[in-house]
Image (tube, rainbow, N blue to C red):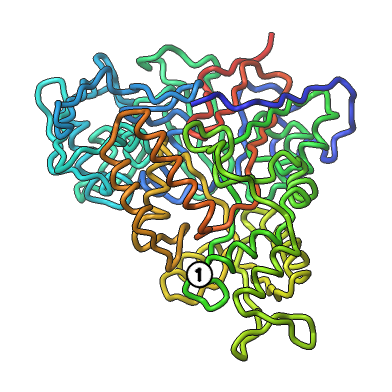
Amino acid sequence: MNHPVLRRLCVSVGMAAIAVSGGLGLPAQAAENDGVLDIASPLEISGFEPAKSGYIFSRMQAAETLFTVNKDGQLVPMLASDNHVSEDGLVWHIAIRDGVLFHDGTSMTAKIVADDLNRAFARPGVLNRAPITTIEAQGDEVVITLSEPFSMLSAFLAHYSTIILAPSAFDAAGEVTAIIGTGAYRVDEVTPPLRVEMTAFDQWWNGQAAIKKVSYLAVSRGETRAMMAQSGDADLVLSLLPVAVNQLSSNSEVTVEVATIPRTRLLKINAAKPFFDEVIERQALSLAINRPAIASIVMRNPDLAATQMFPPSIAGWNNADIPAFEFDPQKARDLLAKAGWVAGADGILEKDGKRFSVTVRTYASWPDLPLIATALQSQLRAVGINLEISVGSYTEIPSGHADGSLEVGLITRSFSMVPDPLATVMADYGPGGADWGAMNWDNAKAADLLAELARTSDASARARMQNELTAILQDELPTIPLVWSELAVSASAKLENLFVDPFEQNYYLSDLRWAK
């Protein structure tokens, strides 16, 4: 993968903090450097089960997986030391790294790893989507047998739901009761859903973390996180809003870094509804959207206007050969007229006695989504489409998919939860669609391409098929991409070696150190 561009904003003009230390009911850690790294993030801890909260513990380097994505975007071994695959692609031999200790002092073995993976395979997560027949330990190797070749297995084994935990992390029923992993930091205390306390593990197999104490706090409101960065109540603040980036860029006590990430805001379309059951209707909807305006006003960066589903940072999936999305309201009107829609007395289109009036469901846990919905409401009204906005819980998207009531969903979709984007694309655009992907849309050619991609390891063959697939998605628009995404992180000027992982796999806390 190509390394995404990082924008570093670090200026020397001072600015009064908008919150005094302690004004948020938090300890005055800016005033007294107690050596604890205080982190504020929007991500809450929903428990210990890896499939639910494993991403927090893996990003915080408390727990680790067999494979990971490095800083150059390459999939590399982590707790594995090597692997090889049989000629027929059905048997994977994964060598387990020597000398790895769990935080309780016990040694990691191939049997423990195999037991953990069998548990992950039997539970919700990504591993049960792989065609696995057996997972067993053989000496110092974990041997995984497949029913058919599956090129993404190592990427699936980098997913947070497959973190490797010590046997003492489980109770007699096999439930996780503590995070006892192998990472740079040992978990001392978890207070769901808000707080994690950690201490550097001095027997980590990969070296020593320079900062010895870490305190993580889940803070849902972006405005509050920005205030914590300004006041110094947090040393590291994750997922800043665009407006906060502008505010913090003039604070000499804070450094802000922004990375383009493989995440897209898009419209999830119910293709069974009479408004969207023809391709030209979905194409018209896309043509009516002024993406550069949304990117400039809401995201504060015109370069985030989506020209296709995948941003340039997703090497192999961004297709330079397909035409970029256009903003052409008149062409949108012409296509809608071709589909049989005519303007009613109030300007809203009608067809077969039905007004072109639909409801878009979205959620405020991503604060920009309701703002984008408001912009879409105005833009679509200009071509005769009435868009009602319903802001609720994110759970209304999958529930509306399940019961068929969803007309349009405005969502954000990451393509890096599994390091190979194919895993997400297969789930979202394969036969039957998915909660966060296509709805009532099927394409036989796309299904064939996805099935073949899952079996193919050859890079040139995959690139050709990925280009074919992205061209289909661009033309048929089972979902309509709007804007790409950035991840903005602020760090106290007291910190050195900050790295913003564009693949959202690792916070690299072990690399951080206090400036001298």
Identify the image quadrant of the C terminus: top right
Residue kind at label 1, given as amino acid type: Asn
Crowd tier of the residue under label 1, counting other residues whose Cα lies within 10 Å: few below 14, some 14–19, many 20 or above? many
> Closest to the observer: 492 or 20?
492
Does 151 appear above or below 363?
above
Can residue 25 be seen at all in this image of the molecule? no
Q: Farthest residue in the bottom direction?
A: 353
Is residue 250 shown left or right of residue 82? right
Q: Residue at x 78, y 34 (%)?
A: 231
In terms of image quadrants, where is residue 364?
Answer: bottom right
Q: Residue at 27% of width from left, 17% of height from top?
A: 81
Q: Could one spot residue 69 in this view of the protein?
A: yes
Up-down: is 245 above or below 8? below
- In the rendered structure, the answer to whether residue 227 lies left or right of residue 78 reads right
Answer with the quarter of the image where residue 341 lies: bottom right
Figure quadrant of residue 148: top left
Residue denoted by label 1: 270
Q: In the orientation shown, which residue stands out farthest toward the left? A: 138
